[in-house]
């Protein structure tokens, strides 16, 4: 049976998938091309955001929620390539992801300066997330909170805002919030997402639907923070390595992202 995390790994060009995942991933990409494009656009954004955070922003700690299976351009790879002393805590509650994570950690040589840890916790259990990540991270120092493709699994917008606020509230001034999520940009995309949710529930037994949010709703997660230019935009347009694709019909335009800093003014407010 295909598994969503392995299907995504296939879309991202990883190696941790089976024949069933490849076949399902190919079929889904043909029927819902925006999904595979979204996954790749999110990963490309992560690579560029990590270059910024570990580079000019000089962040050395990263809390990556809903990390999924390892594929090219992982948070720890980019961060430790730029700054070997970087510390990364991955969080997921998928048994398949955690099994691969344990094998990866057991087989990898110990980091000379930095550290990588995995936490088995649900996004909604903020206490468990923070407690588990504290084994790897020091909350007295700035942390980049990374939430890619995960907030759509929290259906209630107020609850999603609260979760994000609680997590960021535990981090000191100078920390960053990094978000990318599918955008509700057209009726066509919304209908396609609903069909995909139904198909996934029928084929894999996964009954947690993914909710698309309007761009202004996604932007609201950054309220009170210092948003990094160019703001909350489609992923291909966030500090692109080359000229951004301005084709409004491009599937990748339907995934929005942003990076913002928690400042002393945020704390005062």
Image (spheres, grey):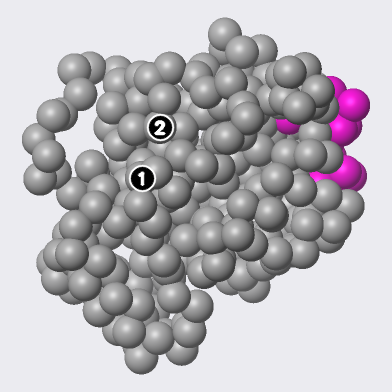
What residue do we see at 38% from left, 20% from top?
A: 230
Quickly name the residue at label 1. 215
Image x and y of residue 205, in percent: 46, 88
Q: Quadrant of residue 244?
A: top left
Quickly name the residue at label 2. 232
Q: Nearer the viewer, residue 106 or 146?
A: 146
The local secondary structure at tag 1 comes to helix
Question: Is 186 positioned to the left or the right of 134 in the image?
Answer: left
**Circle count:** 2
Q: Nearer the viewer, residue 117 or 237?
A: 237
The magenta span reads: 132-143
What residue do we see at 46% from left, 32% from top?
A: 258
Mark 1 near mark 2, Cβ–Cβ under 8 Å? Answer: yes
Q: Quadrant of residue 9?
A: bottom left
* Residue 13 appearing in the image: no
Image height of 125 relative to 262, above or below: below
* Residue 163 appearing in the image: yes
Q: Magenta-highlighted stretch: main secondary structure? A: loop
> Quick check: is 110 in the magenta stretch?
no
Image disc number at residue 104 = none
Image x and y of residue 25, in percent: 27, 68
> Quick check: is 142 in the magenta stretch?
yes
Question: Is 211 positioned to the left or the right of 186 in the image?
Answer: right
């Amino acid at each position: 049976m295909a598994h969503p995390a392995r299907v995504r790994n296939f879309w991202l060009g990883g190696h941790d998938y089976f024949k069933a995942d490849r076949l399902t991933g190919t079929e889904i990409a043909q029927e819902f091309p925006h999904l595979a494009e979204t996954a790749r656009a999110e990963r490309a954004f992560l690579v560029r955001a990590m270059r910024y955070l570990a580079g000019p922003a000089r962040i050395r700690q990263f809390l990556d929620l809903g990390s999924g299976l390892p594929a090219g351009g992982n948070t720890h790879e980019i961060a430790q390539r730029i700054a070997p002393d970087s510390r990364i805590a991955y969080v997921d509650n998928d048994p398949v992801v955690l099994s691969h994570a344990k094998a990866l950690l057991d087989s990898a040589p110990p980091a000379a300066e930095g550290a990588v840890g995995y936490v088995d916790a649900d996004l909604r259990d903020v206490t468990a997330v923070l407690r588990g990540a504290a084994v790897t991270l020091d909350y007295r120092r700035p942390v980049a909170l990374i939430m890619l493709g995960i907030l759509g699994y929290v259906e209630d917008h107020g609850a999603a805002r609260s979760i994000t606020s609680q997590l960021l509230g535990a981090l000191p001034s100078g920390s960053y919030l990094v978000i990318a999520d599918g955008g509700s940009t057209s009726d066509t995309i919304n209908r396609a997402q609903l069909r995909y949710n139904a198909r996934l529930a029928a084929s894999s037994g996964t009954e947690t639907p993914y909710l698309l949010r309007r761009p202004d709703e996604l932007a609201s997660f950054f309220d009170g923070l210092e948003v990094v230019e160019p703001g909350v935009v489609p992923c291909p347009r966030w500090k692109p390595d080359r000229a951004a694709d301005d084709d409004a019909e491009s599937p990748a335009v339907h995934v929005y992202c942003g990076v913002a800093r928690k400042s002393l003014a945020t704390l005062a407010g």
